[in-house]
Image (tube, helix red, strand yellow):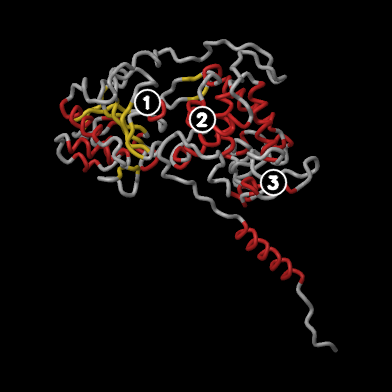
Amino acid sequence: MSSKKKSNPLLKIVLWVVAFLVVFAFSVPIAMPLFNQSSYCDTSDGQDPTSSIGGGKAAGGANGSWTKKGTKPYNNAKELAEIWVSFGVGGQAVAGIGGNAGHESGSSFNPAVTGGNYDYFNADENTRPVAQSANESAGGGKGVFQFTPYTKFAPLGSKKWLSMSAQSKFIMNQIKESGMRLPIGQRRSFDTFKKMSIKDATMAWLEDYEQGSGARFDALPQRLAIANKFYTLFSLKDKKASSTIKSAADGAQESENQGCPTDGDDEGGSGDVSSAKGVKNPILAKAVGWGLTRLNKGITYSMAARWGSSSYDCSGYVLTALEKAGMKNAKSAGNTVGMLQNSNALGQNGKMFKQVSLKTAKKGTIVVTGGLAGAGAGGHTFFLMEDYHGKSTKVLECTAAFNGIANKNTFQYAAINGSPIALEPR
């Protein structure tokens, strides 16, 4: 009689499953978005610093860099450019789309990428199954534009995940139907978007389509770096916006004025944004005056060290400016939520600030966005640097987008978190 024990087949299966899960867990690297970019005008080579997500093959592994002709990421990016040009989108706006798609896909421009999972490339182009992962099972992001949840575009197993064209047409039709969204309820038409500059298109796509906030908006310089490289690499300089869509997806003409804002967004704006001249409220005049003296001093944006003197976040900057102007205990408001709680806005009974009409708000007025749930990256605050006249109104702020204090931004981007409330000191 043999003393050898019989193996347990169920135990073997359990051990294999555990081993697989351990290997999988350690094979998926975690990439942290880079930060502390000093301006929108990133002059790097266009390679997304976050392209190491999912193993970094798009950055120069088996599939190569998207900037190297002949690689799969390059061919994907080129196809994306050609599709949006065929939709009548101007070259600079196409680059803005490319900048966002490149960042969202980890520089792979892969139509089937799932949260940076590039293993999909390893199977044969025509026979490979659509990749499935824990991210997909949980309803996460998928596709070159990272549809989140992925079910808004197509179910798992659909061949649409192999098609750059299908994903692009889906988004184009959404934009044509409802316009590029704005937090304050305005609408930008498809025609308006496709004539934008590289910077404006990159920001508009992030703000309006991606609904970017927090870390996504912090990564704007990286998206712009990709967009600028995308523009030169695929010779988009001579591609002009057209009202005719060349693709078979939609051969119809589009109205030049469909969905355009009607509140005079781009009118006015002749105020002096380099001084506090014209600010009528005495506290706000002094606060804006002090705030402007902080420009070009090397001050950075930080949510950790937010009360100066070498760094602030948005509310730390505004509240410090108010205290410097003589408003007692302004810093006690703490943050954007505290500013609203210390006002009469949104049903609050605060005595520090009073709400005024945004439509008639004057230069120097404080604007808080994000509402009572907008703590941290979910809220923002800034000073108007002109009488409010819509999305192009200039602002003064401390922002992650410029990694510091800036008076170069406009209301439409500063109000990215939505629900803008105009306030003045009581």
> Which amino acid lies under the numbered mark 1 shown in the image of this protein?
Phe
Read off the residue under disc 2: 202
Q: Residue at x 61, y 20 (%)?
A: 239
Which marked residue is nearer to the observer: mark 2 or mark 3?
Answer: 3
Query: What whole-number distance in Å separates the C-alpha atoms at marks 1 and 2?
Result: 16 Å
Query: What whole-number distance in Å separates the C-alpha atoms at marks 3 and 1?
Result: 41 Å
Read off the residue under disc 1: 411
Q: Residue at x 77, y 41 (%)?
A: 125
Q: Earlier in the sequence, mark 2 or mark 3?
A: 3
Image disc number at residue 63: 3
Corner quadrant of residue 410: top left
Image disc number at residue 187: none
Q: Residue at x 55, y 38 (%)?
A: 46
Corner quadrant of residue 266: top left
> Which amino acid lies under the numbered mark 3 shown in the image of this protein?
Asn
User: Judging from the image, what secondary structure is the residue with disc 3 in?
Assistant: loop
> Which amino acid lies under the numbered mark 2 shown in the image of this protein?
Thr
Q: Earlier in the sequence, mark 1 or mark 2?
A: 2
Q: Is residue 177 left or right of residue 10?
A: left
Which marked residue is nearer to the observer: mark 1 or mark 2?
Answer: 2
Which marked residue is nearer to the observer: mark 3 or mark 1?
Answer: 3
Q: Is residue 367 left or right of residue 31?
A: left
In the image, residue 141 lies at what x, y percent? 59, 41
Query: What whole-number distance in Å separates the C-alpha atoms at marks 2 and 3?
Result: 26 Å
User: Judging from the image, what secondary structure is the residue with disc 2 in?
Assistant: helix
Residue 312 to residue 425: above or below: below
Using a 10 Å C-alpha cutoff, classify the residue at mark 1 as few (fewer than 14 neighbours), some (14 to 19) or many (20 or more): many
Using a 10 Å C-alpha cutoff, classify the residue at mark 2 as few (fewer than 14 neighbours), some (14 to 19) or many (20 or more): many
In the image, residue 115 lies at what x, y percent? 60, 45
